[in-house]
Image: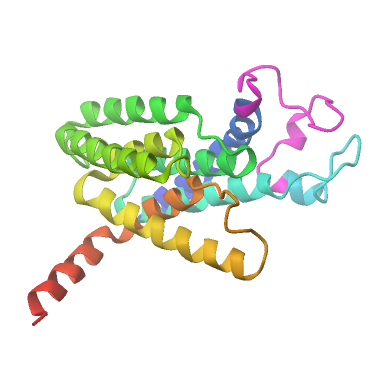
């Protein structure tokens, strides 16, 4: 592990995480993430540079707007810290290179999609579509690292096709956004990584849904955003797909 690479990844994650907060807030509201400058959602005052330092500004301001004193959502520092942590783990695994850039983009998309789906129950097409295009550009530029464009394409078809069948069979329980996110997952994880991701997503989703029903937080017919579960499944596949597949194949080989 190159410590310098990890430090650079953390700083990059903090800076980009701050921008992702802008995207998460503005994209569902059909606002440009580039203009105007960042502002307080409550009083709409334009924020200054000292208000926008990732993590530090939130701590210094006590989690409140410097102008109107309204509370700042804890989601902002969580997105910044989470992005920095994800980037650091990826850098520790592979260093800074094409593989890191490819999976850092994927991780960034998972963060933004999860946050938006939790808040607005929608998975924006612009994120899934641009995610595939951006990933394809990185694969072409890198010459096929960390996976070939053919493998990514197969994963996209398997992920999107599998979720399409589930969408049709669920009669509205799943949406087109979930299908497009599954295709995105397949593109970055390839085959059989996307199978691990989808299996993990449904297991986690079923477990959390059951707990919410038992605790009477949700009813049986209440919808739950599935994007965050797809993101969790993707992370499990990204970091542990190979050992999980090896374990499963070993289990089949040893089974009587």
The residue positioned farthest toward the bottom in the image shown: 256
Of the 4 image quadrants, the one containing the N terminus is bottom left
- Quarter of the C terminus within the rendering: bottom left
Q: In this view, does 96 lie above or below 3?
A: above
Q: Which residue is rendered at x = 36% and y = 39% of the image?
A: 168
Q: Residue sitting at 53 percent across and 38 percent down?
A: 112
Q: Nearer the viewer, residue 40 or 233?
A: 233
Residue 83, horizontal then vertical, whole percent: 52, 46
- Picture coordinates of residue 148 (x, y %)? 16, 36
User: Along the line of sight, which residue is nearer the eye, 196 or 177?
Assistant: 177
Q: Is the magenta stretch mostly helix, strand or loop?
A: loop
Q: In this view, does 49 lie to the left or right of 87?
A: right
The picture quadrant where one finds residue 32 is top right
| 199 w.r.t. 60: above or below | below
Magenta residue span: 28-56
Q: Position of residue 110 (x, y in %)?
A: 46, 43
> Is 133 placed left or right of 115 in the picture?
left
Q: Can residue 16 be seen in this view?
A: yes
Quadrant assignment, res 68: top right
Apparent side of residue 155 relative to residue 203 in the rendered image (left or right): left
- Residue at 35% across, 45% down: 166
State which quadrant residue 20 falls in.
top right
Counting labels gives: 0
**Any magenta on residue 189?**
no
Of residue 36 and residue 94, the one placed in the foreground of this image is: 36
Residue 32 on the magenta span: yes
92 versus 215 height, above or below: above
**Of the pair 201 and 98, the residue shown nearer to us:** 201
Placement of 223 over or under 244, stated as above or below: above
């Amino acid at each position: 592990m190159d410590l310098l690479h990890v430090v650079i990844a953390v700083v990059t994650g903090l800076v980009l995480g701050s921008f992702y907060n802008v995207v998460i807030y503005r994209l569902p509201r059909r606002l440009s993430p580039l203009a105007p400058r960042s502002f307080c959602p409550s009083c709409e005052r334009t924020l200054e540079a000292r208000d926008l330092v990732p993590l530090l500004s939130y701590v210094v301001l006590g989690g409140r707007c410097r102008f109107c004193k309204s509370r700042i959502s804890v989601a902002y520092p969580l997105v910044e810290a989470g992005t920095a942590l994800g980037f650091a783990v990826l850098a520790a695994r592979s260093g800074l290179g094409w593989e890191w850039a490819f999976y850092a983009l994927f991780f960034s998309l998972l963060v933004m999609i999860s946050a938006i789906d939790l808040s607005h129950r929608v998975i924006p097409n612009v994120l899934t579509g641009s995610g595939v295009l951006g990933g394809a550009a990185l694969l072409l530029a890198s010459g096929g690292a960390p996976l070939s464009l053919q493998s990514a394409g197969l994963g996209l078809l398997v992920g999107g096709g599998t979720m399409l069948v589930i969408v049709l069979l669920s009669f509205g329980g799943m949406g087109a956004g979930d299908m497009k996110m599954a295709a995105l997952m397949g593109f970055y994880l390839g085959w059989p990584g996307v199978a691990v991701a989808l299996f993990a997503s449904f297991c986690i989703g079923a477990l959390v849904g059951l707990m919410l029903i038992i605790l009477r937080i949700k009813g049986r017919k209440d919808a739950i955003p599935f994007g965050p579960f797809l993101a969790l499944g993707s992370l499990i596949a990204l970091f542990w797909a190979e050992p999980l597949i090896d374990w499963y194949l070993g289990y089949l080989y040893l089974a009587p």
